[in-house]
Amino acid sequence: MAKYLAQIIVLGTQVVGRAFARALRQEISASQEAAKRAGGGAQGRERAAANARTGLTLDEALRIMNMESLKDKEALERNYKYLMEANDKSKGGSFYLQSKVFRAKERIDEELKNQEPPGPDPHKKSKET
């Protein structure tokens, strides 16, 4: 009886070990693929950090705001205002959907801010002075 119990424990441990190893390999490959899609390097780190802060990827945010690209800032504001009003709780809307719209706009705004060229450093002295 003890022999069978030991065999069951060993086999169970092997099955769990294989499943864990397979899950770990899948997670590593998914992480590498996500890093490739984010662009890698400093830009990839910025995007990954923005995704973590807002809980949305840029693609998700664009889909929520019904936008094709980041180029039309007026459309962003127009869509944001419309979606917030349409989901107003006093009109029978959903606070959850309003929060998703807010987070989507926040994520797009952060991406637009990251795309702007950096201005002159106010701490650097000009050559004239």
Image: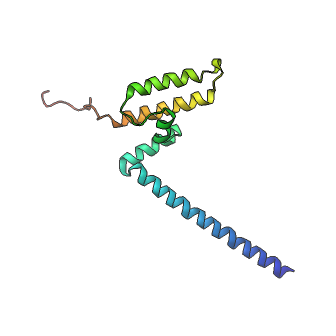
Return the residue found at the far right.
Answer: 1
Question: How many numbered marks appear?
Answer: 0
96 left or right of 51? Answer: right
For the N terminus, which image quadrant? bottom right
Position of residue 29 relative to residue 74, above or below, is below
Q: Return the x and y of residue 4 as percentages of the image width and height.
A: 82, 80
State which quarter of the image contains the C terminus.
Answer: top left
Q: What residue is at 77 percent from the left and 79 percent from the top?
A: 7
In this picture, residue 56 sits left or right of residue 1? left
Q: Position of residue 5 (x, y in %)?
A: 82, 76
Q: Is residue 91 left or right of residue 104?
A: right
Name of the residue lying farthest toward the left: 128
Q: x and y percent of residue 108 in the render?
A: 44, 34
Colour scheme of the picture: rainbow
Could you tell me residue 122's position as x and y percent? Answer: 26, 29
Question: In the picture shown, does residue 23 fall above or below 115?
Answer: below
User: Can you say whether 24 is above or below 45 in the image?
Assistant: below
Say which of 68 and 15 sits in front. 68
Q: Among all residues in the image, which is located at the extreme bottom?
A: 3
Dividing the picture into quadrants, the one containing residue 99 is top right
Residue 114 location, quadrant: top left
